[in-house]
Image (cartoon, helix red, strand yellow):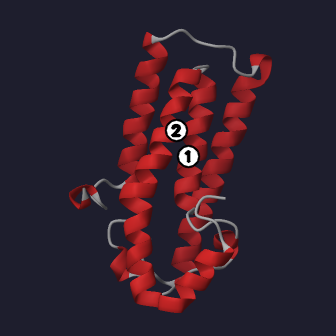
Amino acid sequence: MRKLELKIPPVVLMGVFVIGMWLLSMQLPKQALLANGSTLAAAIISLLGVIIAISGVLAFRKARTTANPMEPQDASTLVNSGVYRVTRNPMYLGFLLMLVGFGLFLQSAYSLVLCVGFILYMNRFQIEPEERFLEAKFHNEFVLYKGKVRRWI
């Protein structure tokens, strides 16, 4: 299973899930998830996801460390300020919110089920390997951070 770890860039994975969600919504019946406000809710949730994800990237840039999720061993600093005080993975949380917003836009509860798949995949093949690297590199500092801040929210 380690062969799959850190292999698919998260933004590509998000694209795969978007396509899967769209295909599911085309094949299965739509549901009135939020009735009249679904488009607005979808836009707000997606925009919140974009803001959170960009905040994560900007925090990495400010700290002058890599934002490349495929190379966590290249991290020069443990970023634990800004949005990282609320979530250890703001970029992934942002992607998840964008997927949820897209599912609401599609009016497809079936497509929203794929969001659970996104979380499971990201936890196992992206976040856990990243955390192993960060713990090895930053030792107690990362362990303390992990104890204070949740993985997602």
Which quarter of the picture shows residue 30? top right
Q: Earlier in the sequence, mark 1 or mark 2?
A: 1
Q: Residue furthest right?
A: 36
For the C terminus, the image quarter is bottom right
> Is any atom of residue 68 visible in this view?
no
Relative to the observer, which residue lies in front, 130 or 90? Answer: 130
Q: Residues within 10 Å of mark 2 (few under 14, many from 20)?
A: many
Relative to the observer, which residue lies in front, 17 or 117? Answer: 117
Q: Could you tell me if the residues under marks 1 and 2 are in contact, i.e. CB atoms within 8 Å?
A: yes
Residue 144 in the figure: left or right of residue 32: left
Q: Residues within 10 Å of mark 1 (few under 14, many from 20)?
A: many
Residue 63 spot, x, y in % from top left: 55, 84
Residue depicted at x 61% and y 19%: 107
Q: Residue furthest left?
A: 3
User: Residue 96 shows which numbered tag?
Assistant: 1
Residue depicted at x 47% and y 90%: 139
For label 1, the SS is helix
Does residue 124 sit above or below 141 in this rendering? above
Hey, what amino acid is under mark 1? Leu
Residue occupied by mark 2: 115
Hey, what amino acid is under mark 2? Cys
